[in-house]
Image (cartoon, rainbow, N blue to C red):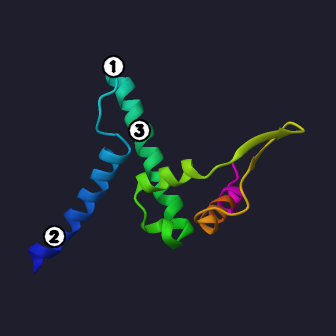
Amino acid sequence: MEAHRCYGKRATCETLIEESKGQMNAGHIRTGEFLANAALFQCAVLAYNLLKWMGLLSGGVIQKWEVKTMRLWLIRVAGKLVERSRQMTLKLPEKFLHQEEWEKWERMSLDVVFQ
């Protein structure tokens, strides 16, 4: 039973590694420069962690989604970026798939304050 518990912890870690390597392309060497690759890897890990945290904080169905599913969902929501009075606004359709989750993300982003 102890071996099963130990492997269960390892399996969870392997899932996270697979997501970061396979879905965020963190396992690919993109340039011939070590420091450039290190910076790109750190950006991929940061993006992965941000998406996972946003999913956890919003709860609901997004919490169980893989990173690739979240990225596709974000890209597939049709919107139009408009500028009025020097302010950018994202116009979204009245109804779209998983609208409640999008609204949760929007509320969370409004609560973030940079000082």
Residue that mark 1 sits on: 33
Q: Residue at x 49, y 70 (%)?
A: 61
Q: To which quarter of the image does residue 57 belong?
A: bottom right
Residue 42's mark?
3
Q: Nearer the N terminus, badge 2 or badge 3?
A: 2
Give the SS element for disc 1. loop
Q: Is residue 50 visible?
A: no
Q: Quadrant of the N terminus?
A: bottom left
| Amino acid at dot 3 | Gln
Q: What range of the chain is rendered magenta?
A: 107-115
| Amino acid at dot 2 | Cys
Q: On the picture, is 27 further left or further right than 113?
A: left
Q: On the picture, is 61 further left or further right than 112?
A: left
Q: Residues within 10 Å of mark 3 (few under 14, many from 20)?
A: few
Residue 6's mark?
2
Q: Nearer the N terminus, badge 1 or badge 2?
A: 2
Asked if labels 3 and 2 touch by Cβ distance under 8 angstroms, the answer is no
Residue pushed farthest right? 85
